Image (spheres, coloured by chain):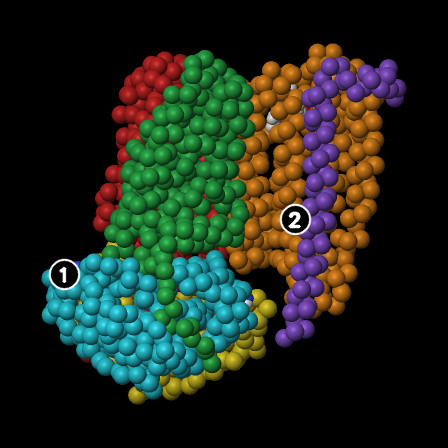
Chain colours: A orange, B purple, C red, D green, E cyan, F yellow
Amino acid sequence: MNWFYFSSPSTFYTLAGRLAPWFFILAAALAAWGLYLGLLVAPTDAQQGAVYRVIFIHVPTAWMSMFLYFVMACYCGLTLVFNTRLSAMMARAIAPTGAMFTFIALWTGAFWGRPTWGTYWVWDARLTSELVLLFLYSGYIALSNAFEDPRRGDRAAALLALIGVVNLPIIYFSVQWWNTLHQGSSVSFKGTSMHVTMLTGMLVMSAAAWMYAIGATLVRVRSVILERERRAQWVRDAGAA
Amino acid sequence: MTIWWSSWADFWAMGGHAFFVWMSYGALLVAVVVEVVLLQARRKRALAAIEEERELEAEN
Amino acid sequence: MIANAQAGTPVAGSFAGGFSWAMARDLRLAWRHPDEAVLTVAFFALVASLFPLGIGAEPQLLTRIGPGVIWVGALLAAFLALPGLFAADYADGSLEQMTLSPHPALGWAAGKIAAHWIVSGLPLTLLSPLIGLQYGLAPDTLAVQALSLAIGTPVLSLLGGACAALALGARGGGMLLALLALPLFVPVLIFGAGASEAQATGLSATPHLSLLGAALIAALVGLPAAIGMAVRIAVD
Amino acid sequence: MIANAQAGTPVAGSFAGGFSWAMARDLRLAWRHPDEAVLTVAFFALVASLFPLGIGAEPQLLTRIGPGVIWVGALLAAFLALPGLFAADYADGSLEQMTLSPHPALGWAAGKIAAHWIVSGLPLTLLSPLIGLQYGLAPDTLAVQALSLAIGTPVLSLLGGACAALALGARGGGMLLALLALPLFVPVLIFGAGASEAQATGLSATPHLSLLGAALIAALVGLPAAIGMAVRIAVD
Amino acid sequence: MTGKHRSGEPDVLQVRDLACRRGPALLFSKLDFEVAGGELLCVRGPNGCGKTTLLRCVTGLTRPDEGIVSWHGESSRVDPERMRAAMAYAGHLPGLKDDLSAEENLEFSLRLRGAPTTAEQRRDALAAVGLDKRRRLPARRLSAGQRRRIGLARLALDPADLWVLDEPLTALDDAGQALFVELLDRHLARAGLALVATHHRLAPTSGVVRELRLA
Amino acid sequence: MTGKHRSGEPDVLQVRDLACRRGPALLFSKLDFEVAGGELLCVRGPNGCGKTTLLRCVTGLTRPDEGIVSWHGESSRVDPERMRAAMAYAGHLPGLKDDLSAEENLEFSLRLRGAPTTAEQRRDALAAVGLDKRRRLPARRLSAGQRRRIGLARLALDPADLWVLDEPLTALDDAGQALFVELLDRHLARAGLALVATHHRLAPTSGVVRELRLA
Ligand code: HEM
Ligand SMILES: Nc1ncnc2c1ncn2[C@@H]1O[C@H](COP(=O)(O)OP(=O)(O)OP(=O)(O)O)[C@@H](O)[C@H]1O
Ligand SMILES: Nc1ncnc2c1ncn2[C@@H]1O[C@H](COP(=O)(O)OP(=O)(O)OP(=O)(O)O)[C@@H](O)[C@H]1O
Ligand SMILES: [Mg+2]
Ligand SMILES: [Mg+2]
């Protein structure tokens, strides 16, 4: 496979257009299966009751929020080192979806916390660093759009994203480094009979989130390419296809 | 692979935690719908901008 | 009648050349207005005294929140001095000249940050025990507080410098800068305030301080180069 | 071939002319970058989130210091937008043109402040209940909090505007401004935070709120003229 | 038929006994001059002789150490509004907002002068200075000369009687300079007054041109 | 005897196939030129034709859309340091600190160029541009022309082979312009290179003068 061939925006535009629907279909199928397992099949937790079912979206979205940031940072590194156009566009396309997942992780966490911890919000390290992640995403989006010249925005925001990578290990290890309310690994569910269904549900939902993120990114990157390559001949020729 | 709930009413009630569970799932639904709408709007805007540009060019 | 310099004299750039140039110039500029250093400290003191006003002056409460407030004050003071760090050089064209100089960006970027710390972070660290006393902190807590500030404020200067350079020429000015810098300051704040708090509650402050030290080393290694790159992007 | 305007057409300045000119222009500038208003709010949220980090997250403690922290956050957010209020117009020569316009200084000074409040104070007031919730404030306290911000933030904008105009062209830039503005902000902070606190402890918030209202009226009457005069001095 | 002579007295700017010092140096003193309708007074002199300072004293931006500036026989210290309403000033700083487009800049600067314009007038004026295609670009994207040309369009639409201009030809190419001279011609032909500091040669075809040479 | 030719190849700035677009407009494309030692290339053209943009592309401040700039036969993208060490750039912005005196500004800008100077050299250079009495004044107090003259003193002391100057004659009076031409003469006589964008006429007595006319 010739990677350089697909790293030109015009070919990638077509490729992305062809792939995106499949990822959405996959995401929908997986989500349907995962929700079926999580909401209908999985037994209710003895200690927490039915609230625990938030886990099927909380954990996948929390994982995706960190993973998408990591992927975005990788693209940003490519942008800075090789000055490739497509990588910058990919990073821009990932950020809003990443921010969306971060927001959902925070939101579901809050609505899970109320019945279990008795409060929507505490200022512990896990929650705070996740909030910082949301700000990093917003900072990335704001900075990349804050320049007249989009190429400048690309490079400046890429640098910011790379500096912000430090936050990822902080989120991930915060439960070990500090005494927090948030549970570390899923202790309370270990060894219970529902373990398998629960784990399957969570993994299936994670896969769904993953596919959705890829699909959304591909659709968005197509718009970004159009916005940026507006004056290129191939866009004219494509007749806005 | 049996359904855990004995009735739909049970299911919607979520063992008394309906508010928290459905606020969570609802937020996810809203967020995904909003994102999809925004994605489409952005694509439309990009295409419109190209058209505009083409007309401008035709003028000059 | 003007005597031209000898054209073609070999001109060579170096890290040290850029560092000393930037530091000497920025310190000279700061010295021209000693008020600025005084004002950083005054701002810090003001913020620290605003809290008891907003919250009420119960001694236990104050002792409890003292380390946190002092760190937040330090953070805000460090933050307020940021917009001017590169913006003035950008507006008057000095930054273009720096980018085109034979000295590597690493050098003058580090020099500017060093000068910024000497003018803002250092006086603030020196003042902190005094403020801590007002909040009724114990002597050992005061010492840990000052130490954590001494290690932490350079990190703030470095991180803030990077954000200031990134926000250069962007719209949204100070607010954008806030959005970028403050979240990155958060970990420093957590470790810094955590150190004094651990000390105050009888635990060891060492883990916090060593994490802070690790952050400083990482920042020293990585950020000056990042700042140089950000400036180059801004001037383009 | 240029068609000149009819020379000698009578040109007349008016308060309304200056006010609407300044407000329309500044809102247009803000609209060009809607991010700025968003960022004010983001900054406010950030500052409010920093405190629990520095201080620790005990619910009682947070409920206790919540109103104070929110007011301090509002104050800093209002403050952060100040340096740009007149400085940009000063640097590009617009302020000279305003001073020489037939409209009275009172008009455009008031217009600029009004635009500043709409962009910074208003969104902040609207957001405050959300932050208050995070700190666990009761609903009635939240309402009083929002009301006190609605009355108090215009005072902050007016006072801050006056200080920004005074500090124009003076050295020390933002820091000097801080030193000038913050002490003036203190009374506003005390009444504002006092109102919520009174409400939270079951007392009446009315005295605080009416004092705040009186401050607003006094500021509205006196400050725009003072700002105009300060600008005139700065331009000289 | 410009209808701008009030109460019969001559349309005139009078400067009496003006003096200004900067630090130890006396820039000028006992400066006396008058400008009447249809006259252009060019202020000339080497760098740093005080041209800018003189112009700012006349407008009222800077307080002179001594002397009186009067407009229509009335001291501008006593009634500054009257003079301000009749005066357009353009200094070393352009007074443009980088984030607003050329057209918006024009709109707001004329509204500030109390002389609102229609969109068509603005479009025409910008077209006349060669900015028709660029009129929607934010001013920061314009070249140095294009930015100065916005100033020319502004002058064209401003109904002021008195122009006070500091180095109006900076950064303009030959066509731009010709445009300015054309504008000045018309202004003088209509009995306008102009006080201009410049290092360039200025030769309008109408009006009376006088020179004031500083130190 | 300037000793600046390394390894025998000609002392030359080469620009190949340079193109730059701004928004929808193509400012220039397929631009090819060379400047050799002792040559002055004047970039000319109407306002907004892209002179400033071209100069910034040559220095490396702006990335061109296409094309290569090489110095001594080596692309400046590959080895930017070598070109930077040999180049003095003066753009529309002066790069002066308002709070530092003329002398300090001179000192720091030359140190930044890696060419430290003695106090005496600086005093002489400032005296030559007519700033001897004002050399301790903060730059903000200086007139527009006096500020530009600090730039002249800087050029006089900079050992650069290549000068890239954008509108160097702005705000200078006749004497100031003559000073600049004198400096340029000498630079060319010593086999220096100069790339200058200007609306003024430039007629140095030595060196080869060529013109590049943009759109
Ligand atoms: C706003 C509040 C919350 C935030 C920001 C948050 C954030 C996160 C993040 C980032 C993760 C993934 C990190 C990892 O895999 O280690 C995670 C995982 C998890 N969260 Fe939360 N959370 C919040 C509230 C809660 C609440 C209230 C609960 C339950 C009482 C909870 C239970 C879990 C569980 C069980 C996991 C999976 C841990 C594992 O198995 O690795 N979270 N959360
Ligand atoms: N504090 C001071 N001490 C001494 N001289 C001063 C001081 N402040 C200003 N000056 C001098 O006052 C003069 C101000 O001149 P001004 O700006 O009016 O000159 P100009 O005629 O407009 O010159 P240009 O042609 O360069 O624009 C300058 O020579 C400046 O050096
Ligand atoms: N986004 C954009 N869209 C359209 N045109 C643009 C854009 N950005 C810049 N331009 C144009 O690019 C040109 C930049 O020109 P540049 O500053 O190089 O001109 P110049 O030759 O130096 O002119 P001057 O003689 O006025 O200094 C201007 O004509 C400007 O209007
Ligand atoms: Mg002048
Ligand atoms: Mg130019």
Does label 1 lie on the same chain as label 2?
Answer: no
- Chain for numbered disc 1: E
Secondary element under disc 2, as helix, strand or loop, is: helix
Quarter of the image containing the N terminus of chain A?
bottom right
Q: Which residue is mark 2?
A: A93
Residue D88 location in percent, x, y?
38, 53
Give left or right: position of B48 versus E35.
right
Q: Nearer the viewer, residue D30 or A103?
A: D30
Residue at the spot x=70%, y=14% of the render?
A: A48
Q: List x then y, in percent, for residue C13.
A: 36, 60
Q: Is A30 situated above or below C193?
A: below
Mark nearest the camera among 2 and 1 is 1
As rendered, which of E40 and C10 lies closer to the eye?
Answer: E40
Q: Chain of mark 2?
A: A
* Circle 2 Cα neighbour tier, 10 Å, few/some/many (<14 / 14–19 / ≥20): many
Type of the residue with mark 1: Asp
Nearer to us in this view, C63 or E136: E136
Q: Residue at x 43, y 16 (%)?
A: D204
Label number found at residue F32: none
**Mark 1 neighbour density, 10 Å: few (under 14) some (14–19) many (20 or more):** few
The residue sitting at the front extreme is E7
Find residue F114 and report its horizontal and vertical position in percent: 32, 62
Q: Residue at x 35, y 43 (%)?
A: D161
Corner quadrant of residue C135: top left
Q: Which mark is residue E65?
A: 1
Instruction: Specify the amino acid type for callout 2.
Output: Ala
In terms of secondary structure, where does tag 1 sit? loop
- Whether residue F89 is visible: no
Quadrant containing the C terminus of chain A in the rendered view: bottom right
Instruction: Check the image and report above or below for A240 versus F20.
Output: above
